[in-house]
Image (tube, helix red, strand yellow):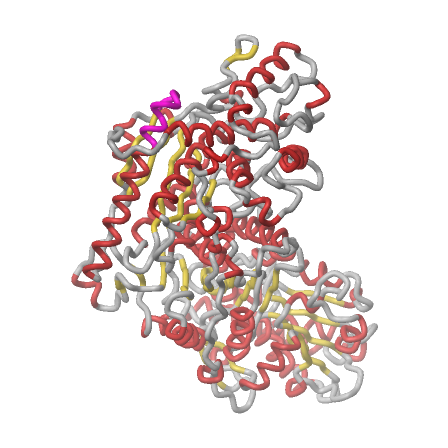
Amino acid sequence: MTVLKNDNTSPPFDGIDKLWRTCNYIATAMIFLRDNVLLRRPLQQADLKERLIGHWGSSPGLSFIYCHLNWQIIQRSCPMIFIAGPGHGAPGVIAPVFLEKGFEHYYPEFTADADGLKNLCQKFSFPGGLGSHCTPELPGSIHEGGELGYSLSHAFGAAFDNPKLIVSVVVGDGEAETGPLATAWHSNKFLNPIRDGAVLPFLHLNGYKINNPTLLSRIGNEELTSLFRGYGWTPIFVEGSEPDKMHIEMASAITAALDQIEHIQVTARKNNQATRAHWPMIILRSPKGWTGPKYSHKQKLEGFWRSHQVPLKSVHTDAEQFNQLADWLSSYKPEELFDNNGQLLAAISKFIPDNHLKMSLSPDANAGRIKKPLNLPNSKDFCVSVGSPGQTYHSNTQPLGAFCCSIMDKNPTNFRVFSPDENSSNKLDDIYRVSKKLWLANYLPEDADGGELSPSGRVLEMLSEHTVEGWLEGYLLTGRHGLISTYEAFIHVIDSMFNQHAKWLEVAKDITWRSPIASLNMLITSTVWRQDHNGFTHQDPGFISLVLNKNPEVVRAYFPPDANCLLHVMEKCFRSENLINVVTCDKQAHLQYLSYEEAKQHVYAGIGKWSWASTDEENTPDIVLACCGDVPTKEVLAATKILMTAFPDLKIRVINVIDLFTLASEHTHPKGLSDLHFDALFPANIPVIFNFHGYPWIIHRLTYKRHNHEHFHVRGYQERGNINTPLELAIINKIDRFSLAIETISRVPALQSAGLQLKHKLKEQQQSHIDYAHKHGVDSPAINQWRW
């Protein structure tokens, strides 16, 4: 155990303590009071809020850390931001932000005086007011904290390519029990001390969650030290409950930690040698509900789970608790903290940094103010040459890797690629020509043979979807750009993270002072239809279902059918702001359909008729074959060929969808087609067979209000699979060319009799191809080498 003591250069603890007392007073007032917020007269029942909402338990520890960091910022003039993992402890962050006029800077009603404090108390956890978490409305926040587990990965994302910034992050001991947080401790192995900033974690052990002990708080210091040294950290302990002693220990601990950080960075930058460092962290043991009431009706409050939310729940009806609240508020001696106007006394204000260093006003926490647009190369330089449609096979994602390689080259300090160990598998490895994978741990000789490792790499891989997603989110929220690629089946690991980021964007877009940030770009590959060896466990296209649930203002979903379309889609995504762009495209070799210019027009429209594959010319079609996704598109085209050959007079219209949300009504989604445009593509009373990449109900959900919806017959993944060849998997889920041709015969009245013999032959062909796959382990050459 390491405990640092006071030295001869200690800060004036009385001033820091008064600032902390003020924060605790405000935090308490926010939870309980709507009037008489400075106790200028005896407390009355009428001064209380009718409904008491808020979390007191973590708040004193959060503001304790915040106040001590402010002193260090003043002394060192170092830029810093503050991330509160226990976001439900927001009163402990809102209070110091209010005192340093972070609120007043953006919200004129929250002036740092008596009137502003009254407004703050009345608006906290109140309809139309401030949330009880560190929401986007909170100046200086880049982390909401409503769902626990992501604070540490967000902190590291903020520190990447930010060499002057120190990211202070408080990890709650409840939060520390989550899987995402546990893996995020390994992020210290990816921090380059030359070009990156630093992360200073505070593991706040206050002992309890809602009504249960926390695991790490019941572990002794020796075991905790072993745990975190094993993670590669250098832990410093601060523990106790007596404020005087705790101020000395915390000041000494932060001083030692920042000195260590400075030493690591100065040494690496002086020698121009990036090696893995054992960064410092601080473990703070303090009571739950610190400085609050210790008991009520003989039940323990401070230092126990009963102080997690509102310690005195019955102040409206219980005279003893009401008197305890009055004593609690008075214990902070507000008369020693505020002047006659309710402003913080000048002697205390000097412990708050100047504007350019206030954590609540940091430009890094309002990323749009410092974000620079990407310097994008010409995507045409990476396109696939396409002569006649459907004649050439090429990996869809490989040109994107070359495109990203050039982006990295042109943007060496504000663009990164993130992945859970899958960049090479996803055919993006051209990027290694400019930047390797970051690796600061030990090297083995064999790593030189294709390992693509480098201490200066800008590609970040770790087999934790949570961690790499958190890194990217933190990177974007502090003004940079990036891409994450991962397998379709396992993007579900970060369903909740996707939800939380979407909610952040939805709220932030309506906050006028929050400037737009770069979009979160997600490449979903290794898709459901090409799991030839992984099988059923890797067959799940359901992430797109989650995307549809989010606010249409912040999500986009693209299914490019070939490499040139993917290039244009990604170029569009890299230029966008305040969105989550989900791009689903398989990595294997697929037929290429559109030239660079044709792809550009198709991506711009998001949906369109492929005239070269259609036979309806300008007439009303007999059947519309629609497709969305690379494999479904190929099968639609193959079915079209079968039908064209068998029924030369059949009028077929082939529609390809790239932007899934074009199918939605213009009244429900900004990308939705007008009814007029939709009806022109899908004429009334004409059967539509829609071949979709994912679950069929999604297309019905998007089109159920359309005029021709009753004639939509959707094929997609039906949760049937095993170790299948691509065609076999398509057949058992009925998205294959034979099934589509059979259904066309059944849906077009003129073919129902004429096509009976063909239907029988097509069913025989299905079985023949399944038999071939089971005998040879691959699809037949007629399938693998099929061309338009």
Q: Quadrant of the N terminus?
A: top left
Of the pair 266 and 405, the residue shown nearer to us: 266
Q: Is residue 395 above or below residue 774?
A: below
| Residue sticking out furthest to the left | 445
Frontmost residue, 756 versus 457? 457
Q: Which x, y percent locates residue 40?
A: 64, 22
x, y (%) of residue 659?
63, 70
Residue at image x 74%, y 89%?
617
Residue 707 spot, x, y in % from top left = 82, 67
Q: Which residues are magenta?
A: 240-250
Viewer-proximal residue among 236 and 153: 236
User: Residue reaching furthest bottom?
Assistant: 387
- Image position of 410 (left or right of 667): left
Q: Is residue 688 left or right of residue 10?
A: right
Q: Is residue 191 above or below residue 11?
A: below
Q: Is residue 368 above or below residue 747?
A: above
Q: Does residue 505 appear in the picture of this structure? A: yes
Question: Residue at image x 51%, y 52%?
Answer: 492
Between 100 and 522, the one nearer to me in the picture: 100
Q: Quadrant of the C terminus?
A: bottom right
* Residue 756 sits in quarter: bottom right
Dominant SS in magenta: helix
Q: Position of residue 737 (x, y in %)?
A: 61, 74
Residue 248 counted in the magenta span? yes
Quarter residue 443 falls in: bottom left
Residue 434 is inside the magenta segment: no
> In this orientation, does residue 760 appear?
no
Count of marks placed on residues: 0
Q: In this rendering, is residue 73 above or below 216?
A: below
